[in-house]
Amino acid sequence: MNYFRTAILLAGMTALFMGVGFMIGGQGGMLIALVVAAGMNLFSYWNSDRMVLSMYGAREVDRASAPDFYGLVEQLAARAQLPMPRVYVIDNPQPNAFATGRNPQNAAVAASTGLLNALSREEVAGVMAHELAHIKHYDTLTMTITATLAGAISMLANFAMFFGGNRNNNNGFGVIGTLAMMILAPLAAMVVQMAVSRSREYVADRTGAEICGQPLWLASALAKISGYAHRIPNMPAEHNPATAHMFIINPLSGERMDSLFSTHPATENRIAALEVLAREMGAGGGGFSAAAARPADPVGNAAAPGGPWGGTSRPSRGPDSRQPQGRRGPWG
């Protein structure tokens, strides 16, 4: 059902894009809009991952530079039966993470230094499992195309101010219709974009919890990240709000609410769903061992130094760490 809904929403986004083209230039404008949409989608398909990673200044890490983090992602990818994605770290104090790439064979996951410093290994495992779930379901491609179309619709609506109301374009709407389109089309595009994102987050939460084997790891991570996101700005995201839906928690400032205008479902609702899933799966069993992902050095120490999580110390939980209400996670 979620896949059907996503397909309908993407079709609606494309139709809206063509409708804006018709408002500007009649049938010819609609045809041009269709060609432009196809071109932008093709460009996004091949270049979206590089664009987003560059936008956030992400640096690629490997087993030598970040042994713990890389090893954790590697073990999770194996559990998810996915090819090993490229692994990136973003120098940003706000705890957050995202995945990108057109398919599992060309995917990348990125975590901020804030995430690696503030969360426990178990919580990071839950977060990265969630991102791998997006890759597994091809959500990264869907959401990138949606963001591209939303931006293009806004661009066309701005063009309408110059071309839509001052000549005969055979659309029959005139200046009033053009002004209405300038306001409503970007709003409708934003609503569709957010609906696509929100429809995938619950699915990724569930699949990610199944990958790592412990829904409460992700539940605790979501509570903690949400608390930090209110207090720590993410300036690259503020400058590029069209990418906000890619993160596990909305990185933009402002209140989060489970409404039509939110890029993510309410964190409380996501945690509640994960707690229900934890009861279904059983509180204790079958969890992925985050500690087992730490590579041993040649002399048998717990971890080789260097890079994020390069030492043996456990990341601190930070001053705003919070467990889901009424429940203590399996990390102790």
Image (cartoon, grey):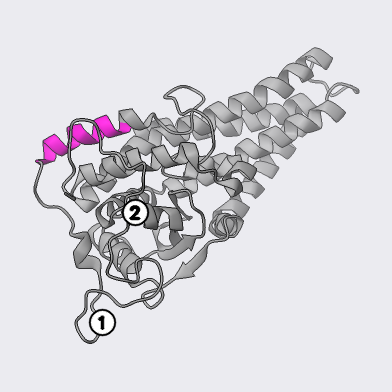
Q: Nearer the viewer, residue 44 or 89?
A: 89
Residue 323, how many percent across, how many down? Answer: 26, 38
Q: Is residue 312 visible?
A: yes
Residue 225, how many percent across, how many down? Answer: 39, 43
> In which quadrant of the rendered image does the N terminus lie?
top left
In the depicted structure, whether residue 107 falls above or below residue 26? below
Q: Is residue 315 left or right of residue 264?
A: left
Residue marked by disc 1: 297
| Count of numbered circles in the view | 2
Q: Is residue 284 left or right of residue 271?
A: left
In the depicted structure, whether residue 273 falls above or below residue 123? above
Q: Earlier in the sequence, mark 2 or mark 1?
A: 2
Q: Secondary structure at mark 2?
A: helix
Residue type beneath disc 2: Met
Residue 216, how many percent across, how many down? Answer: 21, 42
Q: Is residue 61 left or right of residue 208?
A: right
Q: Are marks 2 and 1 in contact (CB under 8 Å)?
A: no
CA distance separating discs 2 and 1: 24 Å
Residue lying furthest bottom: 298
Residue lying furthest front: 319
Residue type beneath disc 1: Asp
Residue 322, how many percent across, how many down? Answer: 30, 39
Residue marked by disc 2: 128
What residue range appears in magenta?
270-282
Residue drawn at x 31%, y 60% is 82
Which label was assigned to residue 146? none
Q: Secondary structure at mark 1?
A: loop
Q: Is residue 250 visible?
A: no
Quarter of the rendering containing residue 63: bottom left
- The secondary structure making up most of the magenta span is helix
